């Protein structure tokens, strides 16, 4: 390990002469002192000179040698690593970029006429030159070096040098970089065995003003108007007191909305959008620095970091929701109408139109074997009720033979849905196995569960000692007195904070909406909330008593909610009546605002429909799929590198490892690259693939998993995911020198930060420094002429002083 500088030492070439030299020296000193003591005190200086000269002569008897260790010429390796990434293309002043200054430094080092610093290093060391970018590569020289590499994988480069020179005489690493790495260390302690690193940085710069996109986060909610929120933070250097303009653009770069704020403001700008399609949707976010006239400024340190692409995954498949009701009602009609136009959800209904009948001889027509209530239906519909002791069920919105046997009785059939809604249906409708299956649907499968109010729901439906009662957020064991008269709804503090509960974007409009809601007459009263449950809304009767109306909680891997109102449909009825009244007034008053195109305004999407849609979206949000695909950036492997992760489960949502997983990756150029998924070493049922997405733009992957079941045969699952690769934006995320990282690396390895102005002095000290392979050199001191000159000078001084005092 190199250390600067190294101290030389004196050694005795003939140590056997030590005692004789000591005796002769001591005798001479005593004689000189005795003779000098008999004369005047002024002669003490002469005596001191005589003693010094005598001791110097005696010291030469032991053959004194000047010994030191220096690096053996050409035996040690010294690596010079230059960060040649595009992050140095930053204007610092007067149009000069940081890359220009580094290039001048390298060209001066390669100069043979001026014996540049690189040539001087090569005189004592085996010099190896490297470029660090997206990968570490060795070069012959740094002349006319261009800084165009797509990444700054400094951390990876140092780790590769450590591995490459393990066990070899690497004396030091000279690193020329701005410290803005696009990768990272897991721990700096891993560099402790590396040779000392000496980062070379440029002097303090007067950078031009610059603004750029900082952190960008995407938050998806069930809010119907704007379910996607894109939060953007900006970074600025030298732009204090000026304004910036942020613009959100779609995938075709069409501006959608614009916001302005001060450049030095710490607040986050949020854009709320509503994608029209499913799958992965791409947006662009752009920031512009404005001048005094609020016009974009062209003179920035760089404009590459002014724009960022954002990927929003809306899901490519519809979420399926099973609605089970004890009777035909208004709730299902309005819920189905609200969800049928939602591109993200699909509502399937299982409605009981007749209860279970007793076993007796029914007086039907002669030869009739099915329930006479189905007389007039086709054969397929009659199959739903072939026995008199079974309830009469009808499926709505089903596919093929879906729900032909009634409510699912096995996990694979029920777990195919993402959420389950039970409305006005008693617990006796389900078998004990079905009740337990619903419990596992929420706790194990991670599905959403909602029970709606009615005369046969909650405690009235005798759910208090069932598995369903255990997963509900309200306690059904204790009875509560019913409210006196109609009740009105209001939001709790937690409800105000949830976007899927609110229907308006501001508090004043939401308060007005709540005031316009009708009174409700049916409530499954409760006041006992389970620990951890959250009350989103309450109702209040005329006496001032409050009751929970909507309560939610996390349960196992899923979530459960209780809507205690039994006539939630009354809200929709009231809205329809109010809109019809407005429509009638418009017909009577020609000067009134004309009716918008699209027909009867009573059929437009209203607040009740939006509330139902948002509630259903909340139920299915974050519900795991059988094939879940995610993208995990891998900065340690380089800019643009991601890991595609596919978690696979069977129909019963047990982990499956016996599958063939293929990742079909499509890059910005439209070319598709098939990749095989490798099983993860850490997580069962997980398959991974590494994608080096260096090319900037939108990337997408279609994942196909093939399950081999010996009973049912092969089964294929598909999922899509997308992400944005932006190596240039990541490279230019910061325009200032990251001195902290460079100092941490230098301190960990035992080096120090070198200013570029002191580089020549540093190189000159290398020849006197410590290194893995050194050679010991020495030269005899007594052979030097200046030793005898000093001795003669001491004796001459003694003689001169004595003669001036008249002594022999």
Image (cartoon, rainbow, N blue to C red):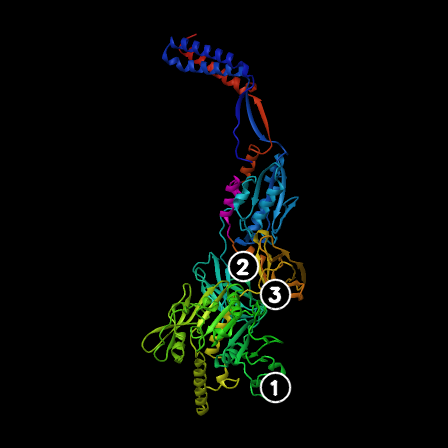
How far apart marks 2 and 3 lie (CA) works out to 32 Å
Q: Which residue is drawn at 45% across and 89% down?
A: 586
Q: Main secondary structure of the magenta part?
A: helix
- Indicate yes or no whether the magenta region holds residue 749: yes
Q: What is the span of residues highlighted in magenta in the rendered image?
A: 736-758
Residue position marked by numbered label 3 in the rendering: 719
Q: Can residue 562 be seen in this view?
A: yes
Residue position marked by numbered label 1 in the rendering: 368
Image quarter where the N terminus lies is: top right
Q: Which one is closest to the eye, mark 1 or mark 3?
A: 1
Q: Do the residues labelled 1 and 3 touch (CB within 8 Å)?
A: no
Residue 340: where, in percent of width, then height?
54, 77
How far apart marks 1 and 2 lie (CA) works out to 77 Å
Q: Residue at x 48, y 87 (%)?
A: 594
Q: Which of marks 2 and 3 is nearer the N terminus?
A: 2
Residue position marked by numbered label 2 in the rendering: 305
How far apart marks 1 and 3 lie (CA) works out to 48 Å
């Amino acid at each position: 390990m190199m250390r600067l500088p190294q101290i030389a030492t004196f050694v005795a070439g003939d140590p056997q002469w030590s005692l004789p030299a000591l005796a002769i020296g001591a005798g001479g000193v005593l004689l000189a002192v005795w003779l000098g003591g008999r004369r005047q005190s002024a002669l003490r200086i002469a005596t001191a000179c005589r003693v010094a000269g005598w001791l110097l002569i005696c010291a030469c008897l032991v053959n004194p040698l000047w010994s030191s260790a220096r690096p053996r010429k050409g035996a040690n390796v010294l690596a010079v690593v230059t960060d040649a990434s595009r992050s140095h293309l930053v204007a610092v002043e007067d149009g000069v970029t940081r890359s220009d200054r580094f290039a001048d430094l390298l060209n001066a080092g390669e100069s043979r006429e001026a014996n540049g610093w690189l040539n001087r290093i090569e005189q004592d060391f085996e010099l190896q030159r490297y470029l660090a970018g997206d990968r570490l590569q060795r070069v012959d020289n740094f002349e006319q070096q261009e800084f165009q590499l797509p990444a700054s994988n400094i951390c990876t480069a140092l780790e590769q040098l450590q591995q490459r020179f393990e066990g070899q005489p690497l004396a030091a690493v000279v690193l020329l970089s701005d410290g803005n790495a696009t990768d990272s260390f897991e721990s700096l302690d891993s560099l402790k065995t590396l040779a000392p690193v000496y980062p070379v940085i440029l002097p303090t710069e007067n950078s031009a003003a610059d603004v750029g996109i900082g952190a960008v986060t995407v938050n998806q909610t069930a809010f119907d108007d704007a379910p996607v929120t894109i939060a953007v933070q900006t970074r600025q250097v030298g732009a204090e007191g000026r304004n910036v303009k942020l613009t959100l653009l779609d995938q075709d770069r069409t501006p959608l909305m614009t916001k302005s704020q001060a450049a030095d403001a710490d607040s986050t700008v949020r854009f709320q959008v509503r994608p029209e399609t499913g799958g992965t949707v791409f947006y662009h976010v752009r920031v512009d620095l404005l001048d005094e006239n609020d016009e974009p400024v062209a003179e920035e340190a760089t404009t590459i970091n002014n724009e960022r692409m954002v990927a929003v995954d809306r899901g490519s498949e519809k979420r399926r929701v099973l609605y089970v009701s004890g009777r035909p009602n208004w709730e299902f009609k309005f819920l189905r109408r609200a969800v049928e136009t939602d591109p993200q959800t699909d509502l399937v209904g299982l409605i009981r139109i007749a209860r279970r009948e007793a076993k007796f001889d029914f007086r039907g027509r002669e030869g009739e074997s099915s329930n006479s209530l189905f007389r007039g239906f086709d054969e397929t519909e009659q199959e739903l009720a072939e026995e008199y002791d079974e309830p009469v069920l009808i499926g709505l919105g089903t596919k093929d033979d879906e729900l032909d046997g009634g409510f699912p009785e096995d996990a694979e059939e029920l777990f195919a849905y993402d959420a389950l809604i039970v409305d006005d249906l008693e617990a006796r409708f389900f078998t004990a196995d079905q009740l337990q299956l619903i419990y596992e649907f929420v706790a194990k499968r991670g599905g959403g569960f909602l029970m709606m109010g009615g005369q046969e729901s909650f405690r009235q439906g005798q759910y208090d000692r069932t598995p369903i009662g255990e997963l509900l957020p309200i306690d059904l064991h204790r009875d509560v007195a019913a409210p006196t008269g109609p009740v009105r709804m209001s939001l709790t503090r937690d409800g105000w904070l949830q976007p899927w509960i609110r229907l308006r974007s501001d508090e004043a409009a939401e308060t007005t909406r709540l005031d316009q809601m009708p009174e409700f007459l049916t409530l499954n009263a409760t006041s006992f909330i389970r620990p951890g449950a959250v009350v989103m809304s309450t109702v209040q009767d005329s006496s001032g008593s409050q009751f929970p109306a909507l309560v939610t909680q996390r349960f196992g891997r899923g979530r459960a909610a209780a809507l205690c109102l039994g006539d939630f449909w009354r809200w929709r009825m009231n809205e329809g009546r109010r809109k019809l009244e407005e429509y009638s007034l418009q017909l009577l008053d020609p000067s009134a605002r004309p009716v918008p195109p699209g027909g009867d305004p009573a059929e437009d999407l209203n607040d009740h429909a939006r509330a139902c849609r948002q509630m259903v979206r909340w139920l299915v949000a974050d519900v795991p799929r059988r094939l879940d695909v995610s993208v995990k950036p891998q900065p340690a492997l380089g800019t643009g590198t991601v890991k595609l992760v596919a978690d696979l489960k069977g129909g019963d949502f047990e982990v499956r490892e016996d599958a063939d997983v293929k990742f079909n990756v499509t890059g910005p150029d439209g070319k598709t690259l098939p990749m095989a998924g490798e099983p993860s070493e850490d997580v069962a049922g997980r398959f991974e693939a590494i994608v080096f997405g260096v090319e900037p733009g939108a990337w997408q992957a279609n994942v196909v998993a093939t399950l081999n079941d010996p009973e049912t045969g092969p089964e294929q699952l598909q999922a899509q995911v997308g992400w944005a690769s932006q190596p240039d934006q990541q490279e230019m995320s910061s325009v200032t020198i990251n001195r902290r990282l460079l100092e941490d690396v230098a301190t960990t390895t035992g080096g120090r930060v070198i200013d570029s102005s002191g580089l020549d002095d540093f190189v000159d000290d290398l020849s006197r420094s410590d290194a893995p392979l050194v050679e010991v050199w020495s030269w005899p001191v007594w052979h030097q002429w200046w030793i005898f000159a000093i001795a003669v000078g001491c004796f001459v001084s003694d003689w001169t002083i004595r003669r001036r005092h008249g002594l022999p």
